[in-house]
Image: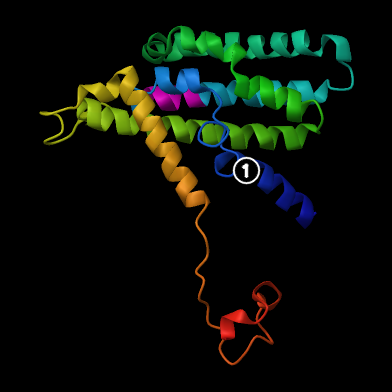
Amino acid sequence: MAENKRSLGSEISKGIIKENPTLVMLLGMCPTLAVTTQAFNGIGMGLATTFVLLGSNIVISALRKVIPDKVRIPAFIVVIASFVTLIGFLLEGFVPSLYDSLGIYLTLITVNCIIFGRAEMFASKNGVLASACDAIGMGIGFTLALFLMGSVREIIGSGQWLGTSLPVLSKNPMLIFIMPAGGFFTLGVIIAAVNKLAKRKPPLEISCGDGCGECPMADKCAGKAGE
């Protein structure tokens, strides 16, 4: 049971950091660059994508043994498009401002490579619970990436954050950050920072105290740390 919990936990966490769909695997670039002129739009697109990803992963995983292999791609598209239509109706009815801001990019979730990729590579090969955890992790990772992008671009490019004016910055905004060029630049900087953090190396010098006998890393350093 404990091992199963750890496994499900890893399915969630991998999408947030290790296999972040946007910052690591570079998927979903179109909505990432298009809707992140504001942090609120980034959150909205991320949550809408997470809803579709979770629903489609669960349904596809549940029907994976029933869907014929020859028609699996059309079947996946029908399932994904159904959830996209549903989230579109919900946003139009309850959050019309967000619906208008996302525009055509909300409909394009149907062909988002993140959703279709998880359906093909994971949900169609794993159980419902694992597929749901995978969708949650990937959705959270995508949402965080869009929120970070939107925050940086809105703060620097508009002098606001979540619609609230910021002192000094609101008087001298760098408008290029809310333009396509600013989106590419912001994305590049964030990806570079994530890669730098992910590839940090441990310190070369470690202290082994009185010796390496009880050190859990003794087999890794071969006693060199104490020399």
Disc 1 is placed on an element classified as helix
Q: Amino acid type of disc 1?
A: Lys
Q: Give the residue at mark 1.
A: 14
Q: Nearer the viewer, residue 227 or 155?
A: 227
Q: How is the image coloured?
A: rainbow
User: Which residues are the magenta region?
Assistant: 40-46
Residue 170 in which image quadrant: top left
Is residue 3 positioned above or below 194 on the image? below
Residue 41 is inside the magenta segment: yes
Q: Secondary structure of the magenta portion, mostly?
A: helix
Q: Nearer the viewer, residue 153 or 134?
A: 153
Image location (x, y in percent) of residue 212? 65, 85
Seen in the image, is 201 located left or right of residue 62?
left
Measuring 52% from the left and 21% from the top, which residue is drawn there? 48
Residue 114 is inside the magenta segment: no
Seen in the image, is 69 located left or right of residue 80?
right
Residue 172 in which image quadrant: top left
Measuring 49% from the left and 44% from the top, which residue is drawn there? 195
Seen in the image, is 71 located left or right of residue 210?
right
Is residue 76 positioned above or below 47 on the image? above
Image location (x, y in percent) of residue 114? 61, 24
Seen in the image, is 98 located left or right of residue 30?
left
- Mark 1: give few (<14), some (14-19) or many (20+) Cα within 10 Å: some
Measuring 25% from the left and 32% from the top, which residue is drawn there? 155
Q: Nearer the viewer, residue 178 or 131?
A: 178
Image location (x, y in percent) of residue 134? 67, 35
